[in-house]
Amino acid sequence: MTAVSTSPVVLITGAATGIGAACARAFAGRGWRVGVATLPATVSDAEQVAAACRALGSEALVLPLDVTDDAACRAAAAELEAAYGRIDGLVNCAGVTRFIPHHDLEALPSSEFTRTNDVNVMGTFHMIRACRGALERSGRGAIVNYSSIAGLSGVGSSAAYAASKGAVISLTLSMARALAPHIRVNAVAPGYVAGGLPSRVLDPEALAAVEARYLETQPLKRLLVPDEVADLTLFLIDGPVGITGEIIRIDNGLHLNG
């Protein structure tokens, strides 16, 4: 008879690249089995992440997933629980943005608000709802949502993005109340992260200008990297069980500028 693993299981959305991929590796390195969820178009990248998790001694399952599709979210959660027997953690890292100057209101169509909200807010809610039952059955369920300093201060790539990340903060607080005492819910609010979402939506020249600006304005004069944001995420899922309803900022001190 094959022994049933009791190792904890985490489902991570947006896990093919950037912070999500770093989270997958961080959890695998701590002995967690990992559901590597990503859009169908980036499954090949997700397979590489899964291979890295296996090289760290963990099991990993790639889950093609569009978080705007509620039925697909429920199916992915069910598939992971069926494969590994449990889900103990959920990391909602999937996100989208476009860079649109905040002052240029005519450049921000309603469709961009809809697209951004559908992924960043509704996608987060879909995944929480899809995983709720398994997380409750776990007895140690914990969720980390990804907000941003944009959601705390109204800055960022666009007004639509800032609004969506502010909504993720409110959703985190609501879910922390609603899902207690069985599931803890917290959010991470990163500043600029080298190798994060901007690196996939900006051309090299624009990206270099953004990074130069952050290096100048952040008190710590450095750029965040995905691995350190992943370490914070792992801490909130696998660390002290008394933390819920918190929004943890990690921004190299940028907020000190007011």
Image (cartoon, rainbow, N blue to C red):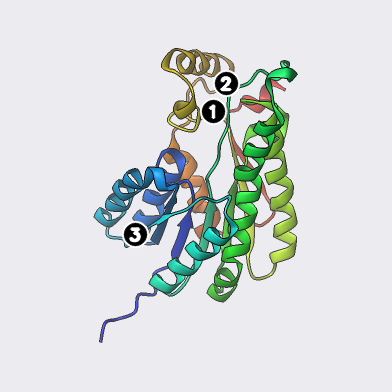
Q: Nearer the viewer, residue 28 or 84?
A: 84
Amino acid type at circle 1 is Tyr
Residue 244 picture quarter = bottom right
Residue 218 badge:
2
Asked whether disc 3 touches disc 1, contact meaning CB atoms under 8 Å apart, the reply is no
- Mark 3 vs mark 1: in front: 3
Q: Nearer the viewer, residue 232 or 71?
A: 71
**In this view of the protein, can residue 231 be seen by the observer?**
yes
138 sits left or right of 118 in the view:
left
Task: Determine which residue is flagged by label 1.
Answer: 192
60 sits left or right of 215 in the view:
left
- Taking 202 as reference, is 176 above or below it? below
Asked whether disc 1 touches disc 2, contact meaning CB atoms under 8 Å apart, the reply is yes
Task: Determine which residue is flagged by label 3.
Answer: 60
Q: How many marks?
A: 3
- Taking 216 as reference, is 112 above or below it? below
User: Would you call the spot at circle 3 few (<14 residues within 10 Å), some (14-19), or many (20 or more)?
Assistant: many
- Identify the mark nearer the N-term, 3 or 1: 3
In the picture as drawn, the residue positioned furthest to the bottom comes out as 1
Amino acid type at circle 3 is Ala
- Taking 215 as reference, is 247 above or below it? below
Residue 169 picture quarter = top right
On the rendered image, what quadrant is the C terminus found in?
top right
